[in-house]
Image (tube, rainbow, N blue to C red):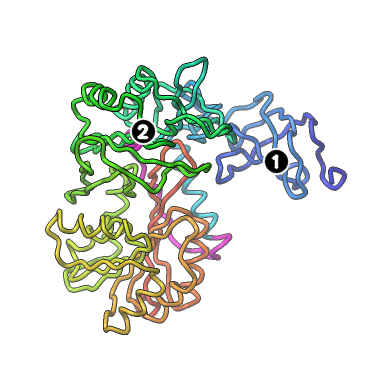
Amino acid sequence: MTNQVPVQKNEYIDVKFEDLTHEGNGVAKVDGYPLFVPNCLPGEKAKIKVVKVNKGYGFGRLIDLYEKSPDRVEPDCPIYKECGGCQLQHLSYPGQLKAKHKQVKEVLTRIGKLENVVVHPVLGMEDPWKYRNKAQVPVGEREGGLIAGFYQKRSHDIIDMEACLIQQEKNDKVIQSVKRICEKYGVQAYNEQTHKGTLRHIMARYGIKTGEIMVVLITRTPNLPNQNQLIQEIIDSNPDIKSIVQNINPKRTNVIFGDETKVLWGDEFIYDYIGNIKFAISARSFYQVNPEQTKVLYDQALKYAGLNGEETVIDAYCGIGTISLFLAQKAKKVYGVEIVPEAIEDAKRNAKLNGIENVEFAVGEAEKVIPKWYEDGVIADVLVVDPPRKGCDETLLQTIMEMKPEKVVYVSCNPATLARDLRILEDGGYTTVEVQPVDMFPQTMHCEAVALLVREKHSS
């Protein structure tokens, strides 16, 4: 294989980087052959060691940096190079926003063949640190003591960690204190190899607007050693803790949660706000990890929807009703559909919590439920989609094109599938007017975006 490519494994070469991958690796080319190298930036010159060679591309390791990018900064995090949580701490924040803008623009052109669509500059954060309101960390043992942190890149080795720079500080403190209390009361860490031990993960959820904290202990077994004393000490450790929950996962699996969840102390929910909408958050609720930027994202979706109080809106991947409830403040009626039954229960609860009555939620696949609504006479003026990373189901895109809503507002967490789906909708009679990227996850390569599409007869 190596004789077909211009580099060999373990070879040292000098390169110049010209791009970033979606994983945040620098891209250098040798006779057109791409090499992906972590911790390198476009414009930089370096000596690298080739560590892996595939037919179409290879991987390298940075050995010596000859010429640095003006956008390079020293990462503040002491475990940045080992940890797999962030990919861009070595790139200045303005540089990150430029890289994300370029990423969105390029995939729209390359995958969507959308050359002339306006892609606005990325809406970033004033302070791009300590934004995550949920921390879930694996627990392990080292030299007889408990450790809790993140997995090392491409491994299941836990890096013990006192604080994470993109987590809310309150969550960090709670996790460290829960770890110490569990250790004190003889709770053993789960061991993946032997499938023995009790504590698999510790999770903390924090309501940024309310200050309320939920602690979730994910265990292999139902029993916790010295449970009553352990719970009492966790409660005493922080007055903001409103809920302590246990989730039991007895399986040999990498999936974090098991099927059984029980409240050990306090309430089943904590509460938080996005804008003026209140949300009940349970241990397993899907709730955006960066509510500040979620508000920015949803305000953009609302702006693109352009509602005046007379419209019927369908939210095709409604989750716990976050976008639906935002839209309902300005629409005549909102219909939300979601495949996860628990999410729909949450959505109904959140509507009730806010006294919002002009919403209706249904469980099921959007591509099946929406045609049924259509048959029943529900005609959407605006259709909103916020699909998972894999993008919209093809049948749903067909349904949209048959239903012909005046506007489609596409909220995306993956620019590549956004570009693919916009191409399909363009071929089906829609015009992409503009795209607004939003930085929901600073220090990482992830980028969200909102696109506005209108039916062609309205695009002039």
Residue at 64%, 41% (x, y): give it.
27
Image height of 244 relative to 294, above or below: above
Q: Which residue is mark 1?
A: 35
Residue identifier under label 2? 223
Spot occupied by residue 350 in the image (x, y as percentages of width and height): 20, 55
Graded by Cα atoms within 10 Å as few (under 14), some (14 to 19) or many (20 or more), the crowding at tag 2 reads few
Relative to 378, residue 155 above or below: above
Up-down relation of residue 25 to residue 152 (above or below): below
Query: As rendered, which of 434 and 140 lies closer to the eye?
Result: 140
Residue lying at 14% horizontally and 65% vertically, measured from the top left: 357
Magenta residues, start to end: 109-135
Placement of the C terminus among the 4 image quadrants: bottom left
Measuring from the top left, give residue 147's x and y in whole percent: 46, 22
Seen in the image, is 22 located left or right of residue 305? right
Left or right placement of residue 38 versus residue 324 in this view: right
- Where residue 42 appears, as percent x and y from the top left, is 59, 38
What amino acid is at disc 2?
Asn
Say if the magenta span includes residue 72: no
Instruction: Tell me which corner region of the image, top left, top right, bottom left or bottom right, holds residue 459.
Output: bottom left
Q: Secondary structure at mark 2?
A: loop
Name the dominant secondary structure of the magenta segment. Answer: loop
